[in-house]
Image (spheres, rainbow, N blue to C red):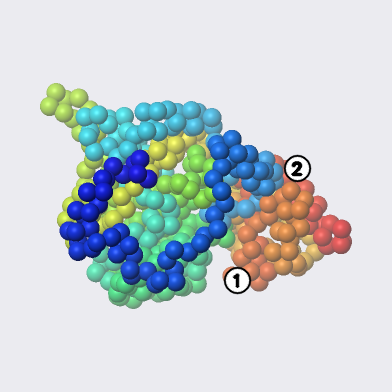
């Protein structure tokens, strides 16, 4: 560290004196004594060559999702990513760029963000979009807070079919604030004048597809907002939520050109109606013209606490996800509306093929009670945890165990990367388990 922090002994002494301390140890007196100076028993340092060998050995223990049959989804999905996405987004002028505070030298980055915003509006059927959030979960939490600011209310209604991990993130955001979140079953809902919003997922966590119209009507009847968390790939074939009357739409942008990559970094999509634009968190890139009439792009309506007075800020999200947003922009530009629809239709039909084959097996029953997109839940005769253990031994990554929500529930996912051979192999393994093989 001394090589990177150029403070002299005199500098350190002066800083300590300014806060009334005589040694650096005084900075850590609030840490209980038994926890200070622990022997962490760390391994000896390695050379670069030795470290490469160690990391390669660790990596060899992983079962690569792209190299084997995988039916795991639940919020992070395998999709085909055209090579152009990596080639363009990894160019040095993009990969090394940071937040475009100086528009005169950041026109390229600003334009890509503007195109990302435009595409998100076209995809969701909404009027405005920001430049991206951390991920889908934080987008949802920020949307709920935004609804509370707009309505002046402190009750959030969330359908039980919303991703449980996203609901946990929302609850974390509400800690220390006079806001409560309640869970409602899907179907006919009734809100009160104390509700700020109704949160639904489309398709829902179990892949189910519902008509959002009744939910929009129920929310608006109570003076609340409808917040919809969407799967952007599904919008290649499903009616966009803006058509149903959604007020805020959020999404996880990972399916659009980003591999699962251990859970991040991702990019959160955030769209809303124009009347709420000044309560939107994050940043927005606008297109304008300079004094000579040339098109220019600038950051505008920056509601982050880094840019305006903290008490008036709508968000403290500061990290730019523009590089991941760029990958999504390139992906959508390359695929086009017809390509995205083809991907969505492949996901849909493959999931229905697999669901039909699995539910033809004795003891397996489809838990979805309506239409579904590329995920579906089945009730299994064997605990899903045990099924996944046996499948993994055969080189197959199974679905998610959702037994806490569905009796012996197993959530499976298919994308355009799922081949008929992989799906048939999965079914054959399940048959083998039933016969004790």
Q: Callout 2: few (<14), some (14-19), or many (20+) C-alpha neighbours within 10 Å?
A: few
Residue 174 is situated, as x and y percent measured from the top left of the image, at 35, 68
Residue in the foreground of this view, choosing between 179 and 216 = 179
Q: Position of residue 58 (x, y in %)?
A: 64, 46
Q: Which residue is denoted by mark 1 in the rendering? A: 404
- Residue 86 visible? The answer is yes
In the rendered structure, the answer to whether residue 270 lies left or right of residue 390 reads: left
Query: Looking at the rendering, which quadrant does residue 167 occupy?
Result: bottom left
Q: Report the disc number at residue 119.
A: none
99 sits left or right of 70 in the view: left
Count of numbered circles on the image: 2
> Along the line of sight, which residue is nearer the eye, 315 or 296?
315
Q: How far apart are the two marked residues, 2 and 1, measured between alpha carbons?
A: 31 Å
Q: What element carries label 2?
A: helix
Residue to which mark 2 is pinned: 421
Q: Which numbered mark, 2 or 1, is in the foreground of this view?
A: 1
Describe residue 415's horizontal placement relative to residue 194 as left or right.
right
The location of residue 55, given as percent across then percent down, is: 60, 43
Residue at the left extreme of this rendering: 291
Q: What residue sits 42% from the left and 47% below the top?
A: 267
Quadrant of the frame with the N terminus: top left
SS for callout 1:
loop
Viewer-side residue, 105 vs 9 = 9
What residue sits 21% from the left and 43% below the top? 300
């Amino acid at each position: 560290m001394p090589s990177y922090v150029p403070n002299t002994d005199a500098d350190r002494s002066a800083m300590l004196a300014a806060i009334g301390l005589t040694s650096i140890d005084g900075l850590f007196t609030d840490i209980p004594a038994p926890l200070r100076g622990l022997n962490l028993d760390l391994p000896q340092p390695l050379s670069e060559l030795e470290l490469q060998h160690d990391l390669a050995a660790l990596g060899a223990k992983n079962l690569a999702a792209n190299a084997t049959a995988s039916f795991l989804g639940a919020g992070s999905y395998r999709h085909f990513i055209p090579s152009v996405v990596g080639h363009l987004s990894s160019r040095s002028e993009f990969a090394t760029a940071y937040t475009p505070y100086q528009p005169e030298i950041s026109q390229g980055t600003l334009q890509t963000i503007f195109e990302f915003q435009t595409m998100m509006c076209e995809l969701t059927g909404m009027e405005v979009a920001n430049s991206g959030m951390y991920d889908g979960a934080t987008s949802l939490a920020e949307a709920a807070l935004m609804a509370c600011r707009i309505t002046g209310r402190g009750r959030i209604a969330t359908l039980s079919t919303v991703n449980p991990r996203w609901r946990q993130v929302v609850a974390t955001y509400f800690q220390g604030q006079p806001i409560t979140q309640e869970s409602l079953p899907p179907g006919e809902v009734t809100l009160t004048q104390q509700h700020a919003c109704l949160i639904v997922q489309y398709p829902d966590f179990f892949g189910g597809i519902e008509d959002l119209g009744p939910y929009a009507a129920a929310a608006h009847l109570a003076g609340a907002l409808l917040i919809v968390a969407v799967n952007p790939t599904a919008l290649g074939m499903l009616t966009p939520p803006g058509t149903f009357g959604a007020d805020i739409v959020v999404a996880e942008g990972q399916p659009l050109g980003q591999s699962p990559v251990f859970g991040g970094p991702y990019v959160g999509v955030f769209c809303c109606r124009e009347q709420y634009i000044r309560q939107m968190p994050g940043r927005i890139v606008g297109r304008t013209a300079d004094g000579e009439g040339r098109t220019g792009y600038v950051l505008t309506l920056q509601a982050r606490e880094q840019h305006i007075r903290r008490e008036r800020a709508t968000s403290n999200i500061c990290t730019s996800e523009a590089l991941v947003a760029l990958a999504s922009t390139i992906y959508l530009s390359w695929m086009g509306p017809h390509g995205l629809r083809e991907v969505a239709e492949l996901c849909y039909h493959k999931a229905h093929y697999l669901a039909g084959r699995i539910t033809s097996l004795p003891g397996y029953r489809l838990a979805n009670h309506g239409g579904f997109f590329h995920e579906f839940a089945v009730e299994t005769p064997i605990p899903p945890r045990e099924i996944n253990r046996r499948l993994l031994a055969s080189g197959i990554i199974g679905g998610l165990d959702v037994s806490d929500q569905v009796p012996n529930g197993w959530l499976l996912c298919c994308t355009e990367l799922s081949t008929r051979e992989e799906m048939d192999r999965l079914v054959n393994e399940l048959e083998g388990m039933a016969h004790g093989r």
